[in-house]
Image (tube, rainbow, N blue to C red):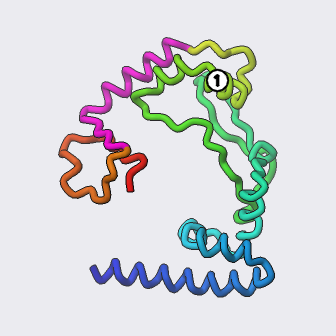
Amino acid sequence: FAYLVANILEKMEKFLEAKKKAEELYASRPDILAFYDFHGPQLITAGIPVESTMMIFNKLKNEVLDAGNFFQIVQDEESNKFFVKTTKNIHAYSNYFIVDHAWTFRDTTINKTLLQNTTLRNRLSSMFQLGDKIELPKEALAAYGEEVSENRGGKELELDSQEIVTLENVVADDVVQLSLWDNL
């Protein structure tokens, strides 16, 4: 317990120091200070320097999605796997990238979602530059589904939108996947 309290106090001290620095740097920008008041703890926890706040604020405000200017998704044709490659040198803390989440899914519904959602398939095809390869590789999807069910070995517990505020008495011993989406 003492370790936990010490850790919390250390983080609070870091936040107060960073907040003071943000107030000095952005005294003429109340919008950025309000942003830092709200997001400061997240930025500090992620190790992002106060000096980067304006860049992140501007990218979010203006919806600057420029990762494509620095990264490329490449397919290894031998293994048929995708990986991310930089196209420019990037130095630590020199840039930050806002990610537009294209698709959030549960591994148990991936097949069904892709089979039923043509718009999503087309969007993913465009993002990965697959051209006309919109047809789903049904064998690969079937194999993925089998792999998931073989490796799971336990129950899924889906407690979405149940107004749950504590996990006390919620999780059973053999639960390997727990969803608490849209709870308090």
Of the residues shown, which amino acid type is indicated by label 1? Thr
Residue that badge 1 annotates: 119
Question: Considering depth in this image, is 162 or 15 the residue closer to the camera?
Answer: 162
On the rendered structure, is 98 left or right of 3?
right
Looking at the picture, how far across and down is residue 13, in whole percent? 51, 86
- Asked if 43 appears above or below 140 in the picture, the reply is below
- Asked if 59 appears above or below 24 in the picture, the reply is above
Q: Is residue 60 magenta?
A: no
- Asked if 123 appears above or below 32 in the picture, the reply is above
Quarter holding the C terminus? Answer: bottom left
Question: Considering depth in this image, is 7 or 82 the residue closer to the camera?
Answer: 7
Looking at the picture, how far across and down is residue 16, in whole percent? 57, 85
Magenta stretch, residue numbers: 137-160
Looking at the picture, how far across and down is residue 157, in whole percent? 28, 39
Looking at the picture, how far across and down is residue 107, in whole percent? 43, 31
Question: Considering depth in this image, is 159 or 44 the residue closer to the camera?
Answer: 159
Number of other residues with Cα within 10 Å of mark 1, as a class: few under 14, some 14 to 19, many 20 or more: few
